[in-house]
Amino acid sequence: MALSKARSEGYLQDAFGVDINRNFQYKWDVFRDQKHLFIRSRSPSSRIYRGSGKLSEKETGAMEQLVSQKNVVALIDYHSGSTQVLYPYAYSTKVRVAENILGGSNDYAVFRQVSEKIASLLNRHDRGDETIVNYTAAQNYNDTSVGSGVARDCYYQTEGIAAINIEVHDKQFTYNAADFIKVVPKICKINVPGAIWFLFWAAELPPVRNTWK
């Protein structure tokens, strides 16, 4: 990817720090099928900068410690940037989840069903804001983008956790004070039904296999 194109798309700007959701250990350094992300994720001035090394940030380290100490069977990772419910794998548009540890016929089918159910719950109410409607379920952000070192991939693949990612706001990645007052409480309210349904669903999951790694 040309530097000019990356810059025009907003990936090369003043430094934002590390994108925590590119800093997890699984596939942190993968670039196969995502060569267009080489500049974006490896530049400290990119909003999706992956960090100097896997688990280099305190936040990802804390998550690793928490998961290792608790019997986590399911996880929702909330982000902003679209209105989608996303399931593994983020690192590829072609590779499908092939295991069977979540209690269904196969985990790919389970992830699709769960994500579609949550998307349908989030779409039930008219919120009056076009930027937080029309949720869809997909494997990849906007159905085409891929990313390495992503939390949902990491915790499913390394721990056998039913991990999904919910994108809660279309085309907005950061929020100022006015946004928090106006938009964020609405987003939280919208997502409550999906979170509650997910919790009840997760309560029926089999125990995480310690031999998964």
Image (cartoon, rainbow, N blue to C red):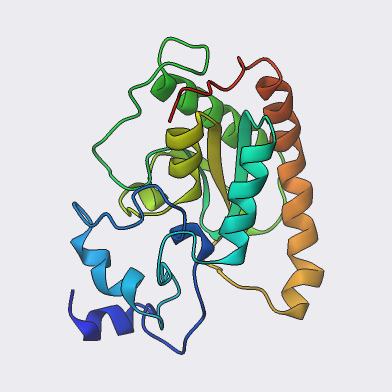
**Quadrant of the snapshot with the C terminus:** top left
Is any part of residue 123 visible from this angle? no
Is any part of residue 119 visible from this angle? yes
Q: Position of residue 109 (x, y in %)?
A: 42, 20
In this view of the protein, which residue sits in the foreground, 146 or 155? 155
Q: As displayed, is residue 165 above or below residue 51?
A: above
Q: Residue at x 30, y 51 (%)?
A: 144
Q: Residue at x 46, y 60 (%)?
A: 23
Q: Position of residue 57 (x, y in %)?
A: 55, 66
In this view of the protein, which residue sits in the foreground, 188 or 96? 96
**Quadrant of the snapshot with the N terminus:** bottom left
Q: Position of residue 193 (x, y in %)?
A: 75, 35
Q: Residue furthest bottom?
A: 14
Quadrant in which residue 165 is drawn: top right
Left or right, 68 with reference to 92 = right
Q: As displayed, is residue 14 above or below residue 162?
A: below
Left or right, 71 with reference to 208 = right
In this view of the protein, which residue sits in the foreground, 103 or 211? 211
Q: As displayed, is residue 200 above or below residue 21?
A: above
Count of numbered badges drawn on the protein: 0
Q: As displayed, is residue 213 above or below residue 55?
A: above
Q: Position of residue 164 (x, y in %)?
A: 54, 39
